[in-house]
Amino acid sequence: MSHARISTNILERTSAELPAQPAVILRNVAKTFPGGIAAVVALSLTIPKAEFLAILGPSGCGKSTLLRMIAGLETPTAGIIEQPHPRVAFVFQDSHLLPWRSVLRNVALPLELRGEARQRCEDQAKLSIDQVGLTDFTHRYPAELSGGMRMRVSLARALVTNPDLLLLDEPFAALDEITRTELDEQLRQLWIARKMTVVFVTHSIGEAAFLANRAVVLSARPAKIALDTNIELGLQRVNALRGEPAYAEVTQRLLLALEAGASRP
Amino acid sequence: MTRLFRDIFPPVVVLLAVIAATELTVARGWIAPYLVPRPTQILAATVENARELFTATASTTTAAMAGFLLSACVGVSLAIVLSAGGWVQRAFYPYAVFFQTVPIIAIAPLLVIWFGFDARAVIASSFIVSVFPVIANTLTGLRSTDPALRDLFRLYGAGPVASLCKLRIPFAAPSIFTGLRVAAGLAVIGTIVGEFIVGTGLGGLIVVARREQRVDKVFAILLLSAALGIVLFTLVNTAGRLVMRRWHASEIE
Ligand SMILES: Nc1ncnc2c1ncn2[C@@H]1O[C@H](COP(=O)(O)OP(=O)(O)OP(=O)(O)O)[C@@H](O)[C@H]1O
Ligand SMILES: [Mg+2]
């Protein structure tokens, strides 16, 4: 919690220590929707393996479009995306659970769709549910859960396939502040435990600074990179970090870039 | 228990009040009894013709159920085919609308020519009247699948059959039941209209009673057919609640 501890943590894992192999490469990627709206123009970005990347940007600048292209749900109109992961998971802004399935069966869904045996689906799903701390709610239905719990189920559903690339599109934006910081901490812990590549789209500067090892700030539509910076706040991060000067410095930097990018002509 | 009381009590009070008011106005001679019979007289007519009415109700119920089930199966299947969109939908949807716009009273004699004075003509009439709401509502439900979930299924490599069975049909359940509830009432109406021409069941009895100027009997039959509609509607409604008991109220239209 103290300043001293955070400084030592910074030394534990710097960007130089991260495995250098790229997980995702975007080369001059562009996306123009039918109707002529250019959401993304000539964007190049390399995301190393096991990186936690936050993408920030003004509303409507093309963040979701970018994430959907990385997931393969949208094809770029120009440029190349190299993303060789067989196991990609996607978390949306709302939980998007199936109301007719219990928590267990919702979490097991991705495995079920891949044709895994039922017993294995359920075993894996139970592990995933444990990891997000919902063991007692395994047999409940989405309608019986709070918004925060439903988001956790959504996270468990994404983790159940053991993804090597986890994409999140403003996943906690609809939650209250306390639940949100709780889930931020949990996500960070999961990332440390799983060593997967995470791309996290958010509106919140604080959330980006707390969670990510690197932040990319996009300018207003069409999206271009306004700032690409490492966030060196140590490996283990707890809520008290949000009161530290180093954290304030990072958020200040991100805020300036966001403001500059938003007012771009 | 209190809930049952809350739901049952108000309509029963209204019913009793209407019966009492009608009895009074007709008994006092404010309305001529050959226009509206006294409720007690309707009851007497029902008891007097109990046997005949029972047989007719049984036959009407069977035909209405058959018509409704046919509508449910054909309607949902047709909607699934039409939901493929593209040229299939453009080519066939106008003919589905035909069921909605065809005046059944004009087509019923044709049904008799095709099927004979037979239960099949009655069931066909019931089907024609009740199938469109099933098609239209199921189609709306199948088209309104949450796009995020559709993406999720795509991301996890689900094929069209898995998407249909595990996502699109369950997701459309509230809409499908909306269609089935409407169809339940219409199936009874279609049955009675068919029976008007064929001469069986409650519809057939109405024709005879009217010819004999037995207004009390006509009313008894009307009330029986209305009750039949309500029973079918309630059955469908209960089935829907059972299927969607896990859903949050806000997810059911
Ligand atoms: N399917 C589509 N068809 C046409 N235009 C689209 C489509 N999807 C997105 N757009 C447009 O592309 C632009 C970028 O959209 P996108 O959803 O990527 O923004 P965003 O940065 O995620 O916004 P927000 O922060 O509000 O979620 C918007 O102007 C939007 O209107
Ligand atoms: Mg978005």
Image (cartoon, grey):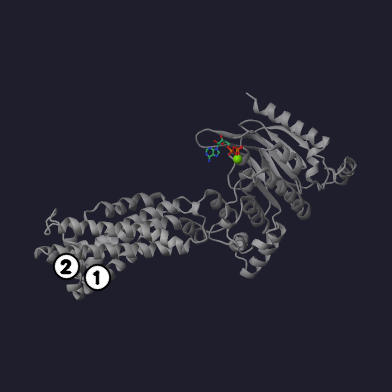
Considering depth in this image, is A13 or A25 the residue closer to the camera?
A: A13
Q: How crowded is mark 1: few (under 14 residues within 10 Å), some or many (20 or more)?
A: many
The kind of secondary structure element at disc 2 is: helix
Q: Residues within 10 Å of mark 2 (few under 14, many from 20)?
A: many
**Residue B57, numbered label:** 1
**Could one spot residue A122 in this view of the protein?**
yes
Image spot of residue B72 (x, y percent): 36, 63
Image spot of residue A197 (x, y percent): 73, 49
Q: Can you identify the residue that label 2 sits on?
A: B205
Residue at position x 56%, y 54% in the image: B154
Q: In which quarter of the image is residue A252?
A: top right
Q: Quadrant of the N terminus of chain A?
A: top right
Q: Which chain carries label 2?
A: B
**Image check: B16 left or right of B36?**
right
**Residue B168, numbered label:** none
Determine the quadrant in which ligand 1 lies. Answer: top right
Which amino acid type is shown beneath numbered disc 1? Answer: Thr
Image spot of residue A175 (x, y percent): 64, 45
Marks 2 and 1, how far apart in space?
10 Å
The kind of secondary structure element at disc 1 is: helix
